Amino acid sequence: QVHLVESGGGSVQAGGSLRLSCVASGLSTRRYPMAWFRQAPGKQREGVAGIETDLTTMYADSVKGRFTISKDNAKNTLYLQMNSLKPEDTAMYYCAADSYGGVWLLYDVGYNYWGQGTQVTVSS
């Protein structure tokens, strides 16, 4: 059975940083495209950053230059380093695994496995 468990969320002031982690069990992060999504109250879930099995990355325009996705396959863990946080980054952040990849990397419809989410709140 596959489990994805996120951690690292919290409350920070604008301009601050957070590092999210997603520990996977039941699947190998080496073998699947993975991504981070977020959903703010009243808004649709959006893809934030994705990483292919060959470590190619993709970012939403709103986070380019501020967020970095990475993974440690030895630890079976996905990360999201978030710098220069803005109030509009406030959302529940989810990790996801097992997608078609490619152009589908930041589309939630392609993912089979999801974590329970971790809350990020950025105050101005």
Image (tube, rainbow, N blue to C red):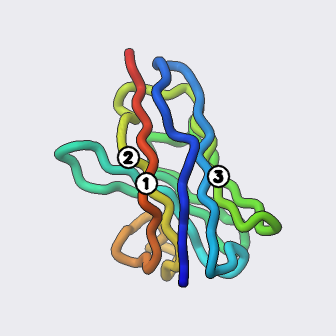
Residue for point 69% across, 55% down: 70
Which of pointers 2 and 3 lies earlier in the amino acid sequence? 3
Marks 3 and 1 sit apart, C-alpha to C-alpha, by: 13 Å
Residue for point 46% across, 75% down: 113
- Which dot marks residue 38? none
Q: Mark 2: few, some, or many residues within 10 Å (few <14, many ≥20)? A: some
Type of the residue with mark 2: Met
* Residue of label 1: 117
Q: Mark 3: few, some, or many residues within 10 Å (few <14, many ≥20)? A: many
* Rendered view: 10 above or below 16: below
> Could you say whether the residue bearing mark 3 is in a helix, strand or loop?
strand
- Which dot marks residue 92? 2
Contact? badges 2 and 1 (CB < 8 Å): yes
Marks 2 and 1 sit apart, C-alpha to C-alpha, by: 6 Å
Viewer-proximal residue, 60 or 94? Answer: 94
In the rendered image, which quarter contains the C terminus? top left
Residue for point 37% across, 35% down: 90
Residue for point 59% across, 28% down: 17
* Residue of label 3: 79
Q: State the image coordinates of residue 68 (x, y, percent, origin top left).
A: 63, 46
- The residue positioned farthest toward the right in the image shown: 74
Viewer-proximal residue, 65 or 84? Answer: 84
Type of the residue with mark 1: Gly
> Could you say whether the residue bearing mark 1 is in a helix, strand or loop?
loop
> Could you say whether the residue bearing mark 2 is in a helix, strand or loop?
strand
Q: State the image coordinates of residue 117 (x, y, percent, origin top left).
A: 43, 54
